[in-house]
Structures are given as structure tokens and as C-alpha cells.
């Protein structure tokens, strides 16, 4: 029986095929997406080098879903993500995303709890658990291990770009908090 607490180990062979070490069979990206939607963490490693490829594959899964019209990420968010790779805000973006998704998950949990307390006979909302699993996978793909390796704030740039970026992030966080507080009511 598989240990659901440990990440499911997927090995990538030189042929680019993905191998599920628990069930001893080959899997596709869609299978991996299903594991994640079911609440299972995965770790994908290159068999030969041992390199962790999880982030690369999670981003590929997100890209495939987006390209099929299953859009979760608005264009302005995608644009801001691309822009963040070229600005001094790069170090703040993962923490901002992690905090935002944590607040969103907490808000969802509170909402689901309040709904179940209002009517305990009410069936579970279809897709809520899958949506939470998708959000966690996205969070892991975007933030990776930044929390473990982040060493503190960067030095402020004299040109003022970092202040503008910080102001933009604060504004986005405030807007997100307002939306979440409206959902709680």
C-alpha cells in the first residue's frame, strides 16, 4: 500500500518516459495531473542525473491546461509573472504568491466550513477538493523551494524600480484581500 504522506516518486527515463515507482508502470502528464488533483504530491526526478524535474513538469501541466482553454490565469497575471523575471521584484514574487494562495486556501476552507455548518446535510461541493489540489500544485510550481532558500530582502535599487514593484505588489495584495474578505461574508 502506498504511503500517501510521501510524494509519489516519478522517474524520467532517457527516453523521456515517466515511470511511477509505486505502481511500476509508465504514466503521462495527464496521469500526474490526476494524482495532484486527487491531493497527492509528486516528485519527478531524472533517472540518470538525479535532478529534480518537478517544477518543469508542473509548469508544463499548467501550460497544457491553459492552452486547451482551461484558463485559470488571466493574461495580466501571466504578463506580470513574465515581467517579474526581469525586475528586482523576482525575489518577492514567490513569497507574495505563496501568501496569496495561503490566504485563498484559508478563505476557501472557512467558506466550506461555514457552508457545512449551515446545513450539515448539504453534500460536498463538487470539484472543491480538486480545485484546492490544483491551487496547491500551482503554488508549488510557482514558489518551489523559495521559502527554504530565501535569505532576506535584497538591497534596494537606487533607480526606484524596486519601490514601484513593491507598491504594485502591495496594491495587488490589498485587492486580493478585499476579494477574499467579500467571499467570507
Image: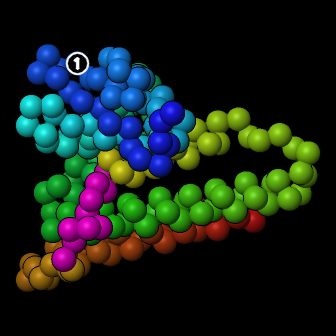
**Percent x, y for residue 109?**
66, 58
Range of magenta residues? 142-151
Query: Which SS class for mark 1?
Result: loop
Q: Quadrant of residue 166?
A: bottom left
Q: Quadrant of residue 85?
A: bottom left
- Identify the residue position indicated by label 1 in the image: 17
Q: Is residue 149 magenta?
A: yes
- Quarter placement of the C terminus: bottom right
Of residues 62 and 78, the one nearer the viewer is 62
Are there few (<14), some (14-19), or many (20+) residues within 10 Å of tag 1? few
Q: Is residue 31 above or below residue 52?
A: above
- Residue 29 shows in the view: no
**Residue at x 19%, y 77% (from the top left corner):** 151
- Residue 49 shows in the view: yes
**Percent x, y for residue 7?**
39, 44
Secondary structure mostly seen in the magenta stretch: helix
Amino acid at each position: 500500500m502506498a504511503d500517501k504522506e510521501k510524494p509519489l516518486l516519478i522517474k524520467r527515463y532517457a527516453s523521456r518516459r515517466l515511470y511511477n515507482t509505486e505502481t511500476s508502470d509508465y504514466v503521462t502528464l495527464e496521469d500526474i495531473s490526476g494524482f495532484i488533483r486527487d491531493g497527492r504530491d509528486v516528485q519527478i526526478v531524472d533517472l540518470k542525473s538525479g535532478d529534480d524535474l518537478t517544477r518543469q513538469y508542473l509548469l508544463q501541466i499548467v501550460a497544457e491546461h491553459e492552452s486547451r482553454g482551461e484558463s485559470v490565469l488571466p493574461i495580466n497575471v501571466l504578463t506580470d509573472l513574465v515581467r517579474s523575471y526581469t525586475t528586482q521584484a523576482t525575489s518577492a514574487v514567490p513569497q507574495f504568491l505563496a501568501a496569496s494562495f495561503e490566504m485563498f486556501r484559508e478563505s476557501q476552507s472557512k467558506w466550506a466550513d461555514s457552508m457545512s455548518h449551515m446545513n450539515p446535510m448539504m453534500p460536498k461541493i463538487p470539484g472543491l477538493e480538486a480545485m484546492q489540489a490544483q491551487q496547491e500544485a500551482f503554488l508549488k510550481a510557482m514558489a518551489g523551494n523559495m521559502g527554504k532558500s530565501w535569505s532576506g530582502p535584497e538591497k534596494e535599487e537606487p533607480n526606484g524600480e524596486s519601490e514601484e514593484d513593491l507598491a504594485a505588489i502591495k496594491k495587488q495584495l490589498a485587492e486580493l484581500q478585499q476579494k477574499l474578505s467579500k467571499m467570507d461574508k
